[in-house]
Image (cartoon, rainbow, N blue to C red):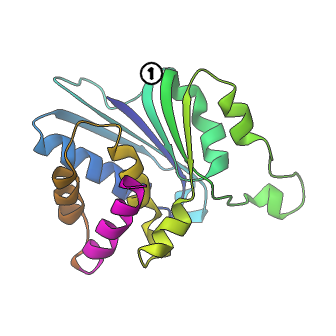
């Protein structure tokens, strides 16, 4: 399986990639993860690739080969949609984080991102991961909600995901991450 995770710096894309990698490893798959940070520490675009299968040679997912795009922000979905293969899945958090040119008034945030993506030969799931994270008690748990939404597209059990989240989370965030995961997994 080839997964692309796109986000804005600080949204937890790297944590999500670690969890997916751990879950796949725990289920006896070969796993490769690659991170491309960009200007992540300044709120810039972050892209992470996760690949798992019987034998994986390269960590990079080429354009047109991603089974799933997990987009933690709407503009990031638009930016990385070319990576998704035909009939692939795009899970989009409906959050809009305005980039600097929009904040400065140099351009407008596009209003038709989801409508445009829905015209493509892909399956689109739009979720309010931010609200679901808040329901679980932490606005910072958007990544765990997105993992829950993604987990439904895998053969891994919920218990495998809970173990992966537990292994990857600092102790004080384990329960809120599990609650957020369940808010993405069960809805």
Q: Quadrant of residue 179?
A: bottom left
Q: Which quarter of the figure has residue 121?
A: top right
- Could you say which quadrant of the image residue 102 lies in? bottom right
> x%, y% of residue 127?
55, 52
Labels in figure, total: 1
Q: How far from the left and from the top, in percent, is residue 35?
A: 40, 45
Q: Residues within 10 Å of mark 1 (few under 14, many from 20)?
A: some
Residue 63 visible in rendering: no
Q: Looking at the rendering, in which quadrant would you find the C terminus?
A: bottom left
At 35% from the left edge and 37% from the top edge, which residue is drawn?
A: 153
- Asked whether residue 58 appears in the rendered view, the answer is yes
Q: Nearer the viewer, residue 42 or 91?
A: 91
Secondary structure of residue under mark 1: loop
Q: Is residue 118 left or right of residue 30?
A: right
Residue 43 point in image, percent of width and height: 60, 62
Residue at (57, 59) in percent of width and height: 128
Quadrant including the N terminus: top left
| Residue assigned mark 1 | 65
**Horizontal side, residue 57 vs residue 76: left or right:** left
Q: Is residue 13 left or right of residue 59?
A: right
Q: Which residues are the magenta region? A: 172-187
């Amino acid at each position: 399986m080839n997964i692309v995770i796109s986000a804005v710096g600080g949204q937890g894309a790297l944590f999500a990639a670690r969890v997916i990698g751990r879950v796949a490893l725990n289920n006896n798959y070969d796993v490769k993860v690659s991170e491309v940070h960009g200007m992540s520490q300044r709120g810039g675009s972050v892209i992470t690739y996760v690949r798992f299968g019987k034998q994986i040679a390269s960590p990079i997912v080429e354009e047109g080969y991603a089974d799933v795009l997990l987009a933690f922000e709407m503009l990031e979905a638009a930016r990385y949609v070319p990576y998704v293969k035909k009939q692939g899945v795009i899970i989009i958090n409906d959050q809009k984080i305005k980039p600097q040119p929009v904040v400065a008034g140099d351009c407008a945030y596009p209003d038709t991102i989801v409508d445009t993506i829905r015209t493509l030969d892909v399956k689109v799931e739009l979720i309010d991961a931010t609200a679901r994270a808040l329901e679980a008690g932490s606005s910072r748990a958007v990544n765990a909600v997105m993992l829950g939404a993604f987990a439904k597209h895998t053969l891994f059990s919920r218990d495998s995901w809970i173990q992966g989240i537990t292994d990857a989370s600092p102790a004080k965030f384990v329960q809120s991450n599990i609650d957020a995961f369940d808010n993405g997994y069960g809805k």
